């Protein structure tokens, strides 16, 4: 069984479009995260959700909006995509902020 | 703000030798530090967690040290194998204890 899954694995789209990436975890964890890994492989936190409440929100553009329908899911919606949004986006989960995180396989987003 | 540095982007060693990776941090005192492994095209995988009151942690061929005076962690892989070739990421909790801040990683190559 996959612990943290993301769909789609690859996403190619045009500038200005709106897209969503889905994430699900079956570990029963209370906290989920979204990270962005740029072309230089730098992994940066974007959002985290704890029990359906946003607890951190890094300085990302408000075009990015996390949506959590329940504790097992944290989706990422992106409006008006820009070239600079091209990156690999990782979802992760953990029991709490003080424990190990389990990462999904990543979604490679390419904006043309 | 917190700053994390991993000593080198790349480290090349011969099979059987011990690989030592360094993680330095400045401007704060984390409660814990984690190490992850990332293979190309995959999400990071948790390896070890060490807390501020622990000096050393071991797991099979892996050893992590945490020196809060030097503000440094060392990550050792003994009897290294080509299969250990990957990027290794150091991560620390942020000051609020709500998320991880990752270093840029060190790519280890073990040649046979």
Image: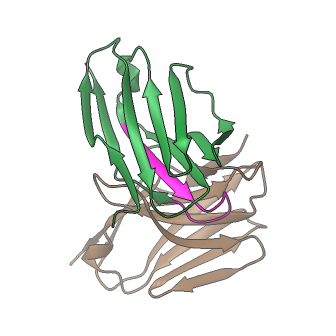
Chain colours: A green, B brown
- Was residue A95 drawn as part of the magenta stretch in this picture? yes
Residue placed most toward the observer, A103 or B75: A103
Residue at 43%, 50% (x, y): give it: A24
Instruction: Tell me if residue B2 can be seen.
Output: yes
- Which quarter of the rendering shows the N terminus of chain A? bottom left
The quarter of the picture where residue B17 lies is bottom left
Residue placed most toward the observer, B96 or B40: B96
- Residue A36 image point, x, y percent: 46, 39
- Which quarter of the rendering shows the C terminus of chain A? top left
Q: Please, is residue A14 above or below residue A95 in the view?
A: above
The quarter of the picture where residue B85 lies is bottom left
- Residue B63 image point, x, y percent: 54, 81
- Was residue A79 drawn as part of the magenta stretch in this picture? no
Q: Residue furthest front?
A: A70
Instruction: Tell me if residue A43 can be seen.
Output: no
Residue placed most toward the observer, A83 or B8: A83
Residue at 54%, 39% (x, y): give it: A68
Residue placed most toward the observer, B69 or A100: A100
- Residue B112 image point, x, y percent: 20, 78
Q: Is residue A52 left or right of residue A1?
A: right
Residue at 49%, 52% (x, y): give it: A92
Q: Which residues are magenta?
A: A88-101
Q: Please, is residue A80 above or below residue A78 in the view?
A: above
Residue at 70%, 50% (x, y): give it: B98
- Residue B1 image point, x, y percent: 73, 40
Q: Residue furthest left?
A: B112
Q: Is residue B78 left or right of residue B35?
A: left
């Amino acid at each position: 069984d996959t612990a943290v899954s993301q769909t789609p694995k690859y996403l190619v789209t045009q500038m200005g479009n709106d897209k969503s990436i889905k994430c699900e975890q079956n570990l029963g964890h209370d906290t989920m995260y979204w990270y962005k890994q740029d072309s230089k492989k730098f992994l940066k936190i974007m959002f985290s959700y704890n029990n359906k409440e946003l607890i951190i929100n890094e300085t990302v553009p408000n075009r990015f909006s996390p949506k959590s329908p329940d504790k097992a899911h944290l989706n990422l919606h992106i409006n008006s995509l820009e070239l600079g949004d091209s990156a690999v986006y990782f979802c992760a989960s953990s029991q709490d902020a003080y424990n190990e995180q389990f990462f999904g396989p990543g979604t490679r987003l390419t904006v043309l | 703000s917190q700053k994390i540095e991993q000593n080198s982007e790349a480290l090349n060693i011969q099979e059987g030798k011990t690989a030592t990776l360094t993680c330095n941090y400045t401007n704060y005192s984390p409660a814990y530090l984690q190490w992850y492994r990332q293979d190309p095209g995959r999400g990071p995988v948790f390896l070890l967690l060490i807390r501020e009151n622990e000096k050393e942690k071991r797991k099979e061929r892996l050893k992590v040290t945490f020196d809060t005076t030097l503000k440094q962690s060392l990550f050792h892989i003994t009897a290294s194998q080509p299969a250990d070739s990957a990027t290794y990421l150091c991560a620390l909790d942020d000051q609020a204890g709500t998320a991880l801040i990752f270093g840029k990683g060190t790519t280890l190559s073990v040649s046979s």
